[in-house]
Image: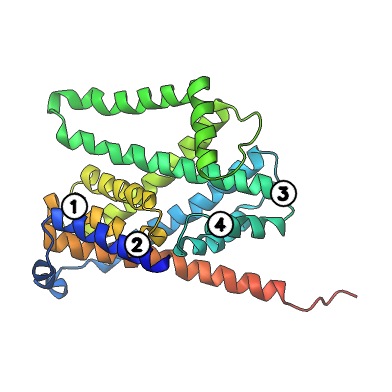
Amino acid sequence: MLAAQLVATIIVTWFVAAQAGLTTSRLRGVEIASWPVDWALFGGSCILLLVGYFGTGLVWGHIVRGLGGATLPGATSIRLFMVANLGRYVPGKVWQIAGLVALSRERGIPASTATAAAVLGQGIGLASATLIGLTSLWTITDESARPWVIPGVLIGGLALSLAPPVFHRVVGLWFRLARSTPPEDLLPGRAAGWFLLGLANWATYALAFWVMVRSLGFETELLPTASAFAAAYVLGYLAVFAPAGIGVREGFLVALMAPQLGAGPAGAVAVIARLWTTVVEVVPAAAFWTGHVTRTHAPDSSP
């Protein structure tokens, strides 16, 4: 099974990158050492990305509370979510949720509530990234149409998705795909509030990526760069055979960034982006995990 997943990841990544014109010779020809890196700006992108990760944890805690679960302190929500996020690097899309459920039980949160909040959070994140990815329409539409195309897509899509029949059908389908039970009495209005939080959070991720690319010396535009990052995330997420979308996400990022950077530099940026997102996520998550294990196994000093 693992071998099949690896083969599928390699084939899809190679195909997408090849369609973007990326070859090994072009990648070898990229001289990263000559790039005028702005380390202060790069550090700022790391901070923005970390804010995005922490924000996702806060959104999850907010959903838990909205579903009738315990009110978690912000720091606790962040810590639990970041530790559970390590499960994203295991093949399959269930380990992150399973870890979050296990950690939540220790805080008195029912498994059903923690699972529902995690599934809703994933759906909101995916929808938010998709919506930001659609802002690429701005760059391909006629200039006279731009003032109404993006607002029309955003407002129309949100209004349609919040119509009760559509909303409940979409939520039911999403929970069936996640093999979970949807929460009872979930109202579109409440979900809209969570979605706006998720959208703001994903805007932070996309902005962080744009700042990171700019820090490498590329004069890229905000909308096409931010939308490329979001769209590549969604496409990588849909590749369920690739843990954390590894390889597939990079292939699509090359394809989406090549028009701005060229295939070779886009390939290098895609690799750097993977290292950047992984390190900024895993380092604090590992620290939180170490603290959790230490507290769990600490001897009880109470009389």
Going from N to C along the chain, the mark reached first, 3 or 4, is 4
Question: At x 41% / y 65%, what residue is drawn?
Answer: 280
> Which dot marks residue 124?
none
Whole-percent x and y of residue 260? 13, 51
Q: CA distance from mark 4 to mark 1?
A: 31 Å
Quadrant in which residue 275 is drawn: bottom left
Going from N to C along the chain, the mark reached first, 3 or 1, is 3
Q: Which kind of residue does numbered mark 1 sit on?
A: Ala
Quadrant in which residue 120 is drawn: top right
Verify CB contact (< 8 Å) between mark 3 and mark 4.
no
Q: CA distance from mark 4 to mark 2?
A: 20 Å
Going from N to C along the chain, the mark reached first, 4 or 1, is 4
Q: Please name the colour scheme applied to the rendered image.
A: rainbow
Whole-percent x and y of residue 145? 17, 24
> Which dot marks residue 81?
4
Question: At x 48% / y 36%, what residue is drawn?
Answer: 195
> Which dot marks residue 255?
1
Q: CA distance from mark 2 to mark 3?
A: 32 Å
Compared to residue 129, the image places residue 48 above or below, namely below
For the question of whether residue 8 can be seen, the reply is: yes
Q: Which kind of residue does numbered mark 2 sit on?
A: Ile
Instruction: State which mark lies toward you, 4 or 2.
Output: 2
Q: Which kind of residue does numbered mark 3 sit on?
A: Pro
| Mark 2, residue position | 246
Going from N to C along the chain, the mark reached first, 1 or 2, is 2
Task: Check the picture and name the quadrant holding the N terminus.
Answer: bottom left
> Which dot marks residue 110?
3
Q: CA distance from mark 3 to mark 4?
A: 16 Å
